[in-house]
Image (cartoon, rainbow, N blue to C red):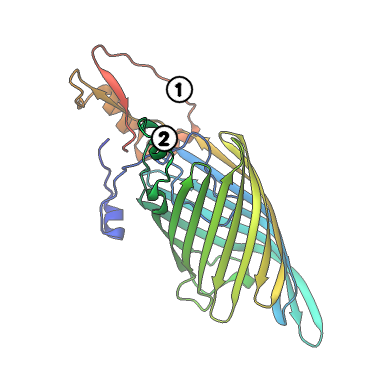
């Protein structure tokens, strides 16, 4: 498949984007129930929805605080242009308890959006691990730790926070958010995700944060995670530790739950969540037609078909189309699945 170039992103990032690795997986790959984000895209033709109903409760700090919140967090993820580029939108709607504590204590409740963030992430580097199954001469080499697993895959994130939110969550203007996303696949059943963010840039509420998440696959369907997050603002430092479970109901549906201990300034408390992640799968693999000598054939019906399937508008409207399995036969030609998108 030819490299795809988009002038808009050339200007924005000052380099060419090319789809080298396919990000599509056979089963859903959700960021929930943790707060961290994998550097990998969901893959082209995927429309993924991740939700989390949460309840948060902390002790009341002096003067002004939000000690209690109940709401829902929604994340939509897709990839229209390139396998390595993901577009996403995150919305959070919640009911907050606003408390005042001085000589006397009072409170009231308010509801509304607390976050509206539109963003994109691009995979800069994907670590390619050695296939040890082909090592048949040495048991020691076949089972030795691959040191390349210590080098993470890397993505960059760029987003914009919309200020059309509830008054208690306003920062005064639209603000940017940037981040670096890392992932180390320590083994086939254990990976570590590390995120660094600089959020609400240019406002009085600007913050730097990190998230470190370790995920362990317990079985083919069940996994658990452990997470630590730190948030640093001008006059306040917060942190939390979390754990939870995710259950793969089927290849397109995941159910998850989490609990975390909160340390927000002088306040302490807890957070619990229950979520569902679901994807609509309209991904189509591309194929390369080869001649008798193993060389790629140009301008064939299959190439034309692939270009049409990977077109921008076709990917948008394909969400409403029913998937079809089309078989084609050509004498004296072989097809090779193209994983280098």
Q: Is residue 275 visible?
A: no
| Residue at the extreme right of the image, as rendered | 104
Mark 1 lies on residue:
324
164 vs 193, nearest the viewer: 193
Q: Give residue 139's mark.
A: 2
> Where's residue 229, x and y in %?
57, 64
| Image quarter of the C terminus | top left
For marks 1 and 2, give the CA distance: 44 Å
User: Which residue is at a point 49% across and 47% down the rendered structure image?
Assistant: 77
Extreme residue in the bottom direction? 103
Specify which label sits upstream in the sequence, 1 or 2. Answer: 2
Quick one: label 1, few (<14), some, or many (20+) residues within 10 Å? Answer: few
Q: Nearer the viewer, residue 336 or 2?
A: 336
> Up-down: is 334 above or below 121?
above
Q: Which quadrant of the structure image shows residue 217? A: top right
Q: Is residue 34 above or below residue 303?
A: below
Residue 190: x and y in percent read 53, 47
Local SS, label 1: loop
- Horizontal and vertical percent for residue 199? 49, 68
Question: Is the Cβ of the residue at disc 1 closer than 8 Å to that at disc 2?
Answer: no
Residue 54 falls left or right of residue 314 = right
Q: Secondary structure at mark 2?
A: helix
**Residue located 48% across and 51% down the image:** 38
275 displayed left or right of 159: right
């Amino acid at each position: 498949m030819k490299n795809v170039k988009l002038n808009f992103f050339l200007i924005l990032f000052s380099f060419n984007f090319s789809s080298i690795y396919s990000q599509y997986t056979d089963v859903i790959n959700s960021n929930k129930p943790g707060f961290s984000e994998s550097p990998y895209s969901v893959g082209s033709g995927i429309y993924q929805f991740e939700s989390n109903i949460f309840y948060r409760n902390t002790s009341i700090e002096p003067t002004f605080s939000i000690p209690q919140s109940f709401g829902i967090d929604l994340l939509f993820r897709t990839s229209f242009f390139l396998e390595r580029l993901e577009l996403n939108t995150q919305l959070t709607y919640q009911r907050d308890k606003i408390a005042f504590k001085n000589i006397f204590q009072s409170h009231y409740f308010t509801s509304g959006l607390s976050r509206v963030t539109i963003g994109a992430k691009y995979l800069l580097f994907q670590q390619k691990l050695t296939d040890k199954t082909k090592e048949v001469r040495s048991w020691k080499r076949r089972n030795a730790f691959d040191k390349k697993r210590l080098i993470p895959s890397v993505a960059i994130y760029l987003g914009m926070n919309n200020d059309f939110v509830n008054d208690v969550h306003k920062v005064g203007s639209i603000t940017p958010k940037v981040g670096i996303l890392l992932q180390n696949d320590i083994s086939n059943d254990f990976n570590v995700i590390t995120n660094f963010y600089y959020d609400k840039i240019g406002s009085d509420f600007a913050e730097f944060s990190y998230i470190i998440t370790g995920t362990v696959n317990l079985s083919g369907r069940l996994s658990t995670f452990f997470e630590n997050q730190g948030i640093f603002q001008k006059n306040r430092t917060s942190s939390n530790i979390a754990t939870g479970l995710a259950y793969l109901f089927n290849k397109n549906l995941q159910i998850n739950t989490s609990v975390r201990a909160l340390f927000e300034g002088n306040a302490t408390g807890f957070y619990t969540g229950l979520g569902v992640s679901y994807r609509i799968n309209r991904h189509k693999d591309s194929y390369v037609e080869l001649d008798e000598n193993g060389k790629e054939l140009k301008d064939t019906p299959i190439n034309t078909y692939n270009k049409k399937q990977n077109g921008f508008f076709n990917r948008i409207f394909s969400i409403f189309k029913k998937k079809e399995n089309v078989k084609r036969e050509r004498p004296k030609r072989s097809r090779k699945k193209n994983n280098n998108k």
